[in-house]
Image: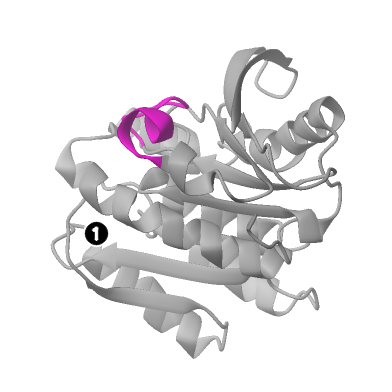
C-alpha cells in the first residue's frame, strides 16, 4: 500500500488537522473506504505505529483513513467541537474529493478501538444512511468512565451536558432512533477481550441491542485485555468483515 499524510483545514473544527491514509495498490478505483478511529490517549498515528495494519490490508482494494479525533469521543459536544459532524460528513467529503473514493453508502465503513469503538458505533447509529458496516474493538460503549481518572468532570460536561445517559450521544438512544428510522441499519460487529475492564459495558450494550432486535455480531470470549496485542490480533478480522459487506474481494 501507499502512505499519504494529509494536512488540511477543518471548517467544522475551526483548526488544521492531520489524517493518515493508506492507499491500495491493487484493484481498480473508485475504492471503498474504511474509516479507522483511535482511542482516547492516542492519535491518528497509532494504528500504524502499534499494529501490522499495512501488511494486513495490503491485498485489499480498500482505502484506510485514520483521522485525528482528539479526546472528543467522536460526538458533537454540547459546548465545544462537533466531532461527529467532522468525522461523518466533513472528512468523507474531503477524502472522496481528494482520492476519488466511492461516494455512496455501500463504499463506506467505520471502526475503531476503545473511544474509537464507541465512536464507530455512535456514528454508525447516528448516521445509519452513511455506512454499510461498523465495528468496535474493546469499545467504551457506555461513554467515558470518569472513575478511572482518564477524563475530567469538566471534559465530561462539555461533551454531554448534565449526563451521557439519555443524551444525543447515548448509543442506546441512537440505536432506538435508528431502529425506528426506516433506514437499513449498517452491519455491526462488536468484540472485547475476556480481561478487558470494559467487558461489562460491552455485554450491556450487546444485551440492549439484542433486545431491540438490532442484528450484530458479538464476541467476548477472546483472550486479551485493553492493549495493542489484542487490537493487532483483531484488526485483520475487522478488515475481512467490512470487505464482505463492501462487496470487495482480495487480490489473488
Would you place residue 1 above or below residue 189 in this image?
Answer: above
- Residue at (35, 53) in percent of width and height: 140
Query: Crowding at label 1, few (<14), some or many (≥20) Cα neighbours within 10 Å?
Result: many
Outermost residue toward the front?
252
Secondary structure of the residue carrying numbered label 1:
loop
Which quadrant of the figure has residue 214? bottom right
Residue of label 1: 198
Q: Nearer the viewer, residue 130 or 153?
A: 130
Q: Position of residue 247 (x, y in %)?
A: 73, 67
Outermost residue toward the left?
195
| Left or right for 43, reference 129 | left
Which quadrant of the figure has residue 98? top right
Q: Nearer the viewer, residue 4 or 115?
A: 4
Q: Which residues are magenta?
A: 40-52
| Left or right for 182, reference 64 | right
Q: Position of residue 114 (x, y in %)?
A: 35, 48
- Residue at (85, 54) in percent of width and height: 104
* Colour theme: one colour
Q: Position of residue 63 (x, y in %)?
A: 67, 41
Q: Nearer the viewer, residue 130 or 103?
A: 103
In the picture, the quarter occupied by the C terminus is: bottom right
Residue 74 shows up from this direction: no
- Residue at (39, 45) in percent of width and height: 115
**Of helix, strand and loop, which mostly describes the magenta segment?**
loop
Amino acid at each position: 500500500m501507499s502512505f499519504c499524510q494529509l494536512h488540511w483545514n477543518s471548517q467544522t473544527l475551526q483548526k488544521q488537522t492531520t489524517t493518515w491514509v493508506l492507499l491500495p495498490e491493487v484493484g481498480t478505483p473508485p475504492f471503498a473506504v474504511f474509516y479507522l478511529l483511535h482511542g482516547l490517549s492516542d492519535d491518528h498515528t497509532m494504528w500504524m505505529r502499534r499494529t501490522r495494519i499495512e501488511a494486513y490490508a495490503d491485498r485489499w482494494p480498500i482505502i484506510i483513513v485514520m483521522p485525528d479525533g482528539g479526546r472528543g469521543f467522536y460526538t458533537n459536544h454540547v459546548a465545544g467541537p462537533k466531532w461527529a459532524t467532522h468525522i461523518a460528513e466533513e472528512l468523507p467529503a474531503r477524502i472522496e474529493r481528494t482520492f476519488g473514493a466511492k461516494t455512496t453508502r455501500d463504499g463506506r465503513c467505520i471502526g475503531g478501538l476503545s473511544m474509537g469503538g464507541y465512536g464507530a458505533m455512535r456514528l454508525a447509529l447516528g448516521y445509519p444512511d452513511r455506512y454499510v458496516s461498523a465495528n468496535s474493538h474493546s469499545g467504551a460503549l457506555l461513554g467515558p468512565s470518569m472513575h478511572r481518572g482518564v477524563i475530567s468532570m469538566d471534559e465530561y460536561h462539555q461533551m454531554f451536558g448534565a449526563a451521557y445517559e439519555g443524551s444525543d450521544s447515548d448509543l442506546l438512544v441512537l440505536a432506538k432512533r435508528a431502529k425506528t428510522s426506516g433506514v437499513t441499519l449498517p452491519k455491526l460487529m462488536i468484540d472485547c477481550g475476556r480481561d478487558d475492564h470494559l467487558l461489562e459495558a460491552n455485554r450491556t450494550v450487546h444485551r440492549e441491542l439484542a433486545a431491540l432486535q438490532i442484528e450484530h455480531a458479538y464476541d467476548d470470549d477472546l483472550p486479551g485485555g485493553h492493549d495493542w496485542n489484542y487490537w493487532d490480533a483483531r484488526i485483520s478480522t475487522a478488515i475481512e468483515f467490512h470487505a464482505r459487506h463492501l462487496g470487495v474481494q482480495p487480490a489473488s
